[in-house]
Image (cartoon, rainbow, N blue to C red):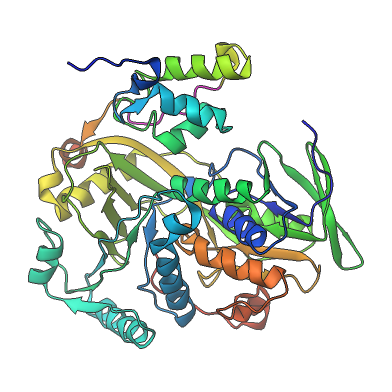
Amino acid sequence: MTLKRTAEVVVIGAGIQGCSIAYNIAKSGLRNVVVLEKDTICSGSTGRCGAGIRAQWGTEMNCRFGLAAIEKFERLQEELGMDCDLHQGGYLVVAYRDSEFERLKESMRLQNSLGINTRVVSYAEAREICPGLSAEDAVGFTFHDRDGHADPFLTTFAYTEAARRLGVKFLRFTEVKAIKAVAGRVKGVETNRGDFDAPVVVNAAGGYAQHVAKMAGVDIPNFSERHEILITEPVEPGVCPPMLISFSGNFYIQQRPNGSMIGGCSPEGHPQDYGLGTSWNFLEAMSRTFVKLLPRARGIRVARQWSGLYNMTPDCQPILCESDDVKGFFLSCGYSGHGFMFGPISGELLAQQILGQKPRIPIGMLHYKRFERGELLVEPAVV
Amino acid sequence: MAVAEKDEEIIICRCEEVTLGEIREWINKGYETFDELKRVLRVGMGPCQGRGCREIILRELSAKTGRPVSEIHPGTFRPPSKPIKLSLLAEIGDG
C-alpha cells in the first residue's frame, strides 16, 4: 500500500471526534485529509460509551452544544446516508436530594432560556414516561423529550463512510510516535508506518489526548478515568423507554432499539491506570440498581460487561481550540464522558475554525488556557 | 421452514440475524477484522458472544485476506461467559 506522505490535515484518532472533524473538513473542500488510528475505527472511548445524547446540562456552553448536537442527530441519516439508530425517548433525570432537585430546576431554567423544553414531572408522570419505574425514594424528576441515544458504532461509521466518499484516507494500525514542530508551527507527525507532513494536525486521541498533546509540547490537565458498563440480552421494547439517569444516584440505564438494556455506574470510583478491565463489584452494584429501579427487569440476563476511558478535564467540559504555542495544532478532547453526543457539532465547529471560518457557536472559552487563567466553567451534571 | 435459496441469504449470526451476504458486503468495504464486523453488524454481541458465528466469519476473513484462520484475531470475549439474570447478580451480595 502506498501512503500519501503529505496531507493538508492529519487527524489523530478515529473515534467520533476524529471522524466527524475529517468529514466536516472534507465537506468544505479540503480533500487531502488523513485520519491516523492506532487500532481500528471506533475501538476506543466512542465504541465503549453509553450512547446517550442530551441537552439537559448545567452550563450554557454544554446546553448550546447539546441542543445543536440533537438537531444534527435528527438529520444525520439524511446528511450521511446511513441509519445511526437514533432513539429519542427523552432523559428522565432522577433527584434523590432536595439540594440536587433545586440545582436541576435551576439548570432547567437555563435550558428553557436557550430553547430546550425541559420540564419538571411528578412521580406519576415519570411512571407514565417509564412504566414500571420504582423510585419512591426520589424527591423529583426533570424530563426533556428530545434527549435520547444513538448507536455509537453506526454513527462513527456513517461519518467514516461519508468522509471516504469525499476522499478522506483512514489508516488503521497507525500509531503516532512524535509530532514535528518548528518555530512554533506544526509540520507533521511521525508514526510506526512512516512520517506525514501536514500544516494542520488535530489531536482527537480520546483517552490518550494528554500524551499526544505532550508530543507537541503542549501541556493540558486532562486525565483518563475508567468507567464500567453492561448490556443485557435483547428483550421486548418498552422496559425502559427513556434514559434513566441520576447524578447523586450515580447511574444511567437505557434500552437500545434492538431491545438490549445498557447500564453504567461506578461503585469503585474511577481508576486512572489506563486499564480496560472489568470488576465483579460493578456487575453486582449495577444489577442491584437495575432491579431496584425496574423490578420487572429481574428476569433479564446480563450478556456482557466492559469498560472505557472518560478523558476528563478539571471542569468536565471539553478542550476545543488551536494551540497558542504550536500553531496549526488543534485539540478536540477532554469531553469528560460526553464526546459521542457532542461529536456531530464539535466536529463541525472545529472544522470551521481550521478552515479559517467563524464557528457558528463561539468556542473561545473552550481553550485549554482557561485552566491556567482559572476561568473554569464547571459542569455539575456528570455521571 | 424457510430455506435460504442462495449462500448470501444464510443467517450466520442467529443472535442478531446477520446473513453471510451482509458479512461479505462489509468485508469488501474494508472491515477486515472480527472486531470491525462486530461493531458494524453486531455479530458476536448477542447472548452467545459469537459461539455460533465466529468460526464462519474467521473463515470468510481468511478467504478475503489470504491469511490463515490461526493468524486472525478472534475478537474479545467479555464476562460473564454465560448470560446471568439481573436478580441473581443483585441478590448474591445479600448472602
Rendered view: B36 above or below A71: above
The secondary structure that dominates the magenta segment is: loop
Q: Quadrant of the N terminus of chain B?
A: top left
Question: Is B51 placed above or below A315 here?
Answer: above
Q: Quadrant of residue B47?
A: top left
Residue lying farthest to the front in this orientation: B5
Q: Is residue A252 magenta?
A: no
Q: Please tell me which residue is depicted at 67% across the width and 66% down the height of the picture.
A: A220
For image coordinates 30% across by 57% down, the residue present is A251
Q: Is residue B15 above or below residue A240?
A: above
Residue A370 seen: yes
Q: Quadrant of the C terminus of chain B?
A: top left
Looking at the picture, how far across and down is residue A39, in whole percent?
A: 62, 38
Residue B42 x/y as whole percent: 39, 34
Residue occupying image coordinates x 59% and y 53%: A19
Q: Give the quarter of the image for residue A37.
A: top right
Q: Nearer the viewer, residue A373 or B2?
A: B2
Query: Which residue reaches farthest left?
Result: A124
Residue at 56% x, 15% y is B62
Measured as percent of width and height from the top left, residue A275 is found at 53, 42
Q: Is residue B25 left or right of residue A281?
A: right
Q: Is residue A34 above or below residue B32?
A: below
| Image position of A169 (left or right of A304) | right
Query: What range is drawn magenta here?
Result: B73-81
On whether residue B75 falls in the magenta region, the answer is: yes
Measured as percent of width and height from the top left, residue A296 is found at 10, 47
